[in-house]
Amino acid sequence: MSDIGVIGAGSWGTALAKLLSTNGHKITVYSAIASEVEMLKSFHEQKDKLPGVTLPDDMEFTTDIVTAVNGKDLVVLAVPSPFTRSTAKTMKDAVAEGQIIVSVAKGLEDESFDTLSQIIKEEIPQSRVVVLCGPTHAEEVGMGVPTAIVAGSKDADDAKLVQDVFMNDAFRVYTSDDPYGMELGGALKNVIALAAGIADGLGYGDNTKAALITRGIHEIARLGVACGGKRETFEGLTGIGDLIVTCASMHSRNRRAGILIGQGKTADEAMAEVKQVVEGVYSAKAAMHLAAKHDVPMPIIEQVNLVLFEEKRPSEALIDLMTRDKKSETV
């Protein structure tokens, strides 16, 4: 049994906390929001973000981040990507030399264009960071629906340790030595999912979505390889797998926000209605900066940026994608 701290009591942090508790580990969940901790203590349920998933009676909840980090065998960092850096700074002094931090959120930082594991390592240099991501909706993981995911680290032993801690008969964990490629796939698929949702909001069909998913993974892989990721990573669970689940499911906050944008709402209005952090909005600009840096064309993500930040009409963006210059599919 491991003693594990989970930082962040949103839907994903809560689902993973239950999973880890089911695996026999001792779990302490941290939230900076006192009312959220009181709710979890009173009901053992994240009623706002993961209703219907009951948490074990012996799970502990705290607003003290030191309590959730100090002396733990590993720490799961599950706050939304815009809060990764600030949370890492807050917990830095409680992290021991060599302590493993499992990064489970997805996104790119808007200003630095860093992945979340890069941010964590920069702010907490004494830590060992493992990335855990793949096609996983918190709602389904919380209910024990069979799921596959990937633990990624340049240190094979660290990846295998996380694999052992998380894996059970309903949660299969693979390992990878390409955490950077995994994180790019996990962040960029959210931007493509916005595009898929916008197409849904415009009333388009399965043909359109299939085209966006297929051409979307082409864009993601092209940029990912240019940035140093491995092509096979984008062909796996953290690439095409994650993209499919995010573009196809109403569990996806990015797809839901895209639908609202396609129906005429602004990005801010859509995020307010979804009531959760829409990671793709925060990753879209960073993706375009990386594309410019590496001279990689990304027409879908470019159009998403124009819709999000330049008030371009979604219908015009789809027309511009369809009427681009003729080309070979494999170029």
Image (cartoon, helix red, strand yellow):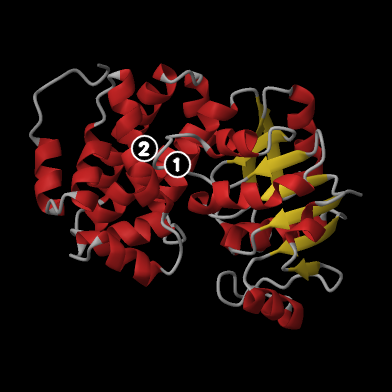
Q: Quadrant of the C terminus?
A: top left
Q: Nearer the viewer, residue 169 or 23?
A: 23
The answer to whether mark 1 and mark 2 are in CB contact below 8 A is: yes
Q: Determine the residue positioned at 23% across, 21% down.
A: 329
Q: Mark 2 is on which residue type? A: Ala
Secondary element type, mark 1 = loop
Q: Which residue is mark 2?
A: 286
Q: Nearer the viewer, residue 306 or 215?
A: 306
Horizontal relation, residue 76 to residue 312: left or right: right
Q: Determine the residue positioned at 35% across, 35% down.
A: 287
Q: Tally the numbered discs.
A: 2
Q: Residue at the far bottom: name it.
A: 42
Q: Nearer the viewer, residue 265 or 71?
A: 71
Q: Mark 1 is on which residue type? A: Glu
Crowd class of label 2 (few under 14; some 14 to 19; many from 20; radius 10 Å): many
Can you see residue 136?
no
Of the image marks 1 and 2, the number of the one nearer the N terminus: 1
Secondary element type, mark 2 = helix
Residue 64 point in image, percent of width and height: 75, 64
Residue 72 point in image, percent of width and height: 85, 49
Residue 110 point in image, percent of width and height: 39, 42
Query: Marks 1 and 2, how far apart in space?
Result: 7 Å
Q: Determine the residue positioned at 83% across, 51% down.
A: 70
Horizontal relation, residue 208 to residue 56: left or right: left
Can you see residue 6?
yes
Horizontal relation, residue 325 to residue 16: left or right: left
Q: Which mark is residue 109?
A: 1
